[in-house]
Image (cartoon, rainbow, N blue to C red):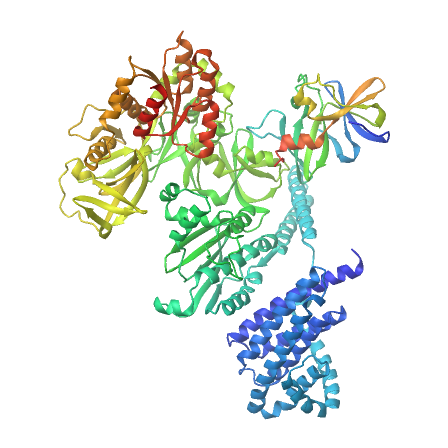
Amino acid sequence: MKHSDEKKLYSTFRIAGRLYGIDVMSVQEVTKSLPCTRVPLAPKYFRGLINLRGQIATAIELKELFDLSSASAKETMSVFCEIKGSLLSLIVDEICDVVEVDGSSFEDIPDTVPKKIRSLMSGVYKIPGDLLSILEVDKITEIVLGTKK
Amino acid sequence: MNAIDSALNEFMAECQEILDRVGQSLSIIEAGKHDQLIVGSLYRDMHTLKGTAQLFGFSFIGNLAHAMESSLEPLRKGNTKNIDVTFLSALFDSTQLIEKIFESIREGKGELPLKAEFERGISNLVNSITFGMNKEINLNSDHDAECSLSLDFLKEREFASKPEVKVLKVIGSEKNAEKEEYMDTEKVETRKDVSSDNQSDSTIRVSVHVLDKLMNLVGELVLVRNQVLQFSQKVEDLEFLNLGQNLNMVTTDLQAEVMRTRMQPIGSIVGKFQRVVRDIANTLAKKIEIHIQGSETEVDKTLLEAVKDPLTHIIRNSCDHGIESPAERKKNGKPEAGTISIKAYHEGGQVVIEISDDGKGLNLAKISQKAIERGLFTKDQLDRMSERELSGIIFMAGFSTADQVSAVSGRGVGMDVVKTNIEKIGGTIDISSVANKGMRISLRIPLTLAIVPAMIIRSGVEKFAIPQVKLVELVRVEKGSEGGQKIEFLHGRPMLRLRGHLLPLVHLKESLGDLEAKNVEAEILSADASNVVVLHSDGVSFGLVVDDILDTGDIVVKPVGQFIKTLETFAGATIMGDGSVALILDVAGLAKRSVGEKDVKSESQRMSDWLNSDQNIKAKKEESQDFLLFETNAKGKYALPLCLVHRLEEFSLSQVEYSGTQKVIRYRNSILPIITINNALDLHKLPNSDTSTVPVIVVQKNSRSYGIEVNGILDVVSIDGLIDDNIRDRKGIMGSAIHHDEVIVVVDILNIIDSEAKRLGHEITASEISRTKMNSSRVLKVLLAEDTPFFRKQILKFLEKCGFQVTVANDGLEALKLIKDSAEHVFDLVVSDIEMPNMDGLTLARSIRELERYKLTPLIAVTSKFKQRDREEGERAGFNRYLEKLDEEVLLSEINNLVG
């Protein structure tokens, strides 16, 4: 995938110490974790449903989705983003800065990363001192909410 | 959107309202029930339409409206009782034409494409006016001045080119001056009328989007109110408490009013159908009357819009396919005019709309024929369908029975679209039809999409909502209560005797995966009292055991991700008074999952579960089985395994015919041999048992149907799989079982059929069996995997009869274990069911094929899952053959082909 040199803005956060980012425009708001209603029978990554001022958001435990060890942080944060009409709440450990990245530092996720996880990422930016994985939010919505088809 | 566009939209919406009202007024006039008020309102509507249309430069509409307005003048001023039919129909036509022009404008094409039609329409209108006018003049000579005035107006506009009008021109021209003056005063007068009693002035148009937002905000307000109330009680400040109470009341009222803003009487769309029916009746030269009942029933605006098209379609269908031509109706002894009635009413939190006609009903034979032609079903499949299922075919995509595509209906998009649209809004559609008596379609739609009356229950610490629609009753069963009502267990499954019937219970915790099935009994027994919510959905009744029943109330259904629905347990989510999210239980899904015994565990889990407990097999062996109970001449109840029953039928005595001495009934294009159970079992006739109907149980064996005539069909019960075969007082009896302290005689129906089949010449020839024995030099070893005890026994018996050495497994896992445990290649053939617990047939086949030494062993699937897709899947999994259950003839010949 070739990306142009244009600059892009990403909201970044950490899960189990790793750095992830999503397009700043798709983030609606960030809150500390809100009361969450469990959905029985649902897969583990499906944390539950959250009432965000009258709108119901689906909470996704990214840690589970990415098969990361669940050494849980004391206080988790919620990143709310609206994708194709459905409201998602991504549960993360820590919110980081909004970073501006250059298209030239972009690369596809290397093949050594498990395919399941690779398919949830659109790529990686090499930023100073760290690697920033970019979430493919559409894909996550598709898998998690079953909106495909 | 710029100012002109929005003004144009406003104009369109208003005109649509006017046209709707005009249609209704005209219908009333046609029915002869009009008075001065109706004519007045019609006149004013035309006037407004004329004015606004011309303001926007739509001269065609303006001119048509003007012509109609003028033509109504004499009616309004004078004798309103005598209305000429031609004139009225010209008015109808013109209204329709205006709508057509509107449509064209809406599509952005403007008026021009319809110029020819417009000219034709206006001249027709003028013609009819002239015609009616002449009569009118004769009747009331003092009105002639105004009559000619109107026509003069038409002339001046040069609408008409017909000679009749030219004649009238002469009259008109004499009164030119008077006309101008008249028109002016008239305008002022009309304006006054409009402001005084025109309905549209007391309403304003608000976009639904705004209402939705309002509704959401009120929902939020309710939550805040709840929090304030809770807080006010804590603070113990009297004034604050009072304020809280006030806030409470105002909020409640506000909520109710906001909800009402979205409600509209159903009459606003149903009223239109009078014109629709009238137009179609005219086109098809039929006489159709339409009766509307309950037009004041209120429904959410969005839902109303959603049912509009389906309803129109159903009514068009009724007119076109349902109601016969007058001649045909007369021949059948019906009144010439057909009737379509629309009835709307509230029932159980839903709105029911019934559309019935007294036409010819559905032609089931034709439906079947078409279904075959379109390749939707095979003849075989259709034969097995009940009338209800057959009627249901019309809801399938691309199905239309009309031989010819008419202008009215039958264009291939049909009832399937109706069904999808109704289901999309959470409604259901039901059809019932009686040949030559008519048919009825009932639509059940929720009152509103957003608000559902529900019951809130608790399971563990979580709250769930159950829609009231599915709720039948609540039962509280207390431990050791005097009434004797208690929860009993049938093979570990909880049951409740409710008014003499056994109601299966489902523990919600088990359905939610919080409780293992084997612990359900202990859980219920340890509770002091059990709360049972009796639910009914899709013909299945069951009781849901919950921890607590909390409250009832209206809940607001919130949109959630599609994913939740795929769990088949939740229908959606809602926000509770305290701001927490609660899931809404999907009763139909629960029923399907629990009563249909679908295992939700994953394959690997199943495997480990099974390995952990060897008792599993033993438990499975004592699995209960369903039986159909029936009456015979003898005392007591008789039963046969439900899995054998193909269909239940009731024939009238007159349908029974004889072929030789064999009782037969013509049944779905073939002849069904009737075996009278009393004769087969040699039971003597009881006195006074003569009835006019013959209950028949249809059983299939070797692809042939046999009708078992019984005295009466009683019930379906679940009985312990073990049948005591020690007591067999006569041939044809398999043994007896105990159910509810009653002895039930289990009939060996296949044996009876076999001996009957021998008589009819259906038997498997002995040579076929001996061929198998001859073919193989040694005894073939067969592994049979089948979970249902009954089928297992039958297939086992048959295979042994054919001389095989059979090893039996109760499910796929057990079969696989048997294969894996044996060091070498032991079995020559594997016969397996597809649907089995622990491991199904497909997985079994795949696993067997993985073993090197069983790569080529013939695998045969015997199953009741017999669709082409299933068969292909079976073949992919590694089965050599995929056969229908209990067709011994085919099974044997396939074994011969594979092994021989």
Q: Position of residue B718 (x, y in %)?
A: 32, 31
Which quadrant holds residue B189?
A: bottom right
**Residue sitting at 16 percent across and 39 percent down?**
B679
Left or right of B423: which side holds B579?
A: right
Q: Quadrant of the C terminus of chain B?
A: top left
Image mark count:
0
Which is nearer the eye, B53 or A89?
Answer: B53
**Residue sitting at 37 percent across and 24 percent down?**
B787
Which is nearer the eye, B76 or B695?
Answer: B695
User: In the rendered image, is residue B182 in sight?
Assistant: yes
Left or right of B289: which side holds B92?
A: right
**Residue sitting at 24 percent across and 42 percent down?**
B673
Left or right of B738: which side holds B597?
A: right
Q: Position of residue B557 (x, y in %)?
A: 59, 43
User: In the rendered image, is residue B742 in sight?
Assistant: no
Q: Position of residue B17 (x, y in %)?
A: 64, 65
Give the vertical position of B484 relative to B161 (above or below). Answer: above
Q: Quadrant of the N terminus of chain B?
A: bottom right
Give the vertical position of B101 relative to B460 (above or below). Answer: below
Q: Position of residue B326 (x, y in %)?
A: 41, 69
